[in-house]
Image (cartoon, rainbow, N blue to C red):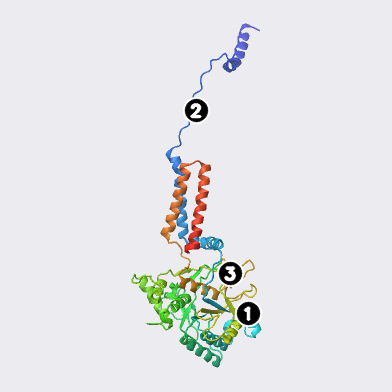
Amino acid sequence: MNSHELEAAAGGRLSLVLPQLPGYLYRHGSYPRLPMPPAVSSPPSASRRLRPAGLCLALALLGGWLSWLPFGLDVEERLGFPVLFALRGERPPPADVVIVGMDGRSSAKAGWPSRPELWPRSRHAELIRGLARSCVRLIVYDVFFAAERDPQQDGELADALREAGNVILVSHLGIGDELPASIPTNGWQVERKPLARFGDAALAVAPFPLPAVAGEVSGYWLFKPDAGDLPALPAVAALAQAEEGGSLKPAGGNYTERLRSARQNFLEGALAATGIDQQGMLNRLSAMPDFVYLNWFGPARTIPTLEFPLALRRVAETAACGEPFAGKTVFVGMSETSPVEQKDRDVFDTPFTTEAGSRLSGVELAATAFANLRDGDSIRRADEVVQLASLLAWGWVAGVLWTALEAPAATLLSLAAALGYGALTHWLFAARNLW
């Protein structure tokens, strides 16, 4: 090998060794060790610390916006409303409200038709006379007497209504056949009253409009906007019972027109809601929203209920102004208890629908609504300003926690705050009827 080849081979080996020499010397202590600079952690920037607060406030604003939409309200009614009632549980029913229930079992025993509106009207006349003799405060009939039947029995019922003087009959709402050109026929409803001889003999006539939606019923229309602010049956009954001096004679016009007029005056700012007497009740009802949420007492038959034949026997056996009807408001209507018999009947799902499927009847809804209005304990929904303020406050609290604290502490305190907010919501609902 010549000299040039030796130099090339040596240079190649050096090129492999020299780059590794510093590491070798450093590991064996022959290379000077330089002190490592201390680790310095920079504090998080202000924007990074405020980011959780901004996110919480944004979510609060989003929640407020969703709560104003029909979709958000529907979700709250379907999910939140039943939970609040489940947490609150049942409450004592009114002591002076009684239901006379009409059911298929009673009609089968008596040999009457299964549909209550087809029952012998002489039996209704007998019940009304017996209740009047027992000194009931008010009778509310949730049975629509629409067509003429047996002339003699129709006459008996009309006479009984006129003699009692304290019976309110239900009417129906439907699309009118003949409406002015200025009224859209697809959105305007007119009242279909019972037979004229019955309506004229009754103390008042009013509908009981419920929302036409599937699933649970949460409330009813106190005033129907698409029917000229027509007041509902419970409102008319509450006003009638508030009459002073025990006289059920409408002063200054019928109850429906008085309520409608008071409602218009309130909307125009000419009426204040005060008091609990007749005028106070009129003012208070007119100041309520169009749609009112029901404050349930419990499952079916929570309000004391007597079957129709039993009620007939009781009024026949009871002396004048005796129990169990003296001084009470009596609702009469279909009240089935068996889930099998309730099929295709006037029944509705509520937060207290039983696991077996037993639901509340229309007459129970009417009696519940009446008691709520009379006692002033209907469920009130917090107005939009309060809802938005609550959501913003919650977003601010969560933002402060997640900005000022580490994640574990912020998580625990957020959960504690959520539990506290839930407890406050439950207390307001159970003690103040505020949703």
Q: Position of residue 137 (x, y in %)?
A: 48, 81
Amino acid at circle 3: Pro
Q: Quadrant of residue 229?
A: bottom left
User: Along the line of sight, which residue is nearer the eye, 152 or 368?
Assistant: 368
Label 2 vs label 3: CA separation?
Answer: 68 Å
* Marks 3 & 1, CB-CB < 8 Å contact: no
Q: Earlier in the sequence, mark 1 or mark 2?
A: 2
Give the foreground label among 2 and 3: 3
Look at the numbered disc 1 and give the secondary structure of its residue: helix
Q: Is residue 296 left or right of residue 3?
A: left
Label 1 vs label 2: CA separation?
Answer: 85 Å
User: Do we see residue 175 in this rendering?
Assistant: no
Q: Earlier in the sequence, mark 3 or mark 1?
A: 1
Residue 39's disc is 2
Q: Position of residue 1 (x, y in %)?
A: 66, 7
Q: Is residue 241 left or right of residue 306?
A: left
> Tag count in the figure?
3
Give the foreground label among 3 and 1: 3
Q: What residue would you read off at disc 3?
A: 299
Q: What residue would you read off at disc 1?
A: 104
Look at the numbered disc 2 and give the secondary structure of its residue: loop
User: Do we see residue 379 in this rendering?
Assistant: yes
User: Along the line of sight, which residue is nearer the eye, 274 or 338?
Assistant: 274
Residue located 42% across and 58% down the image = 386
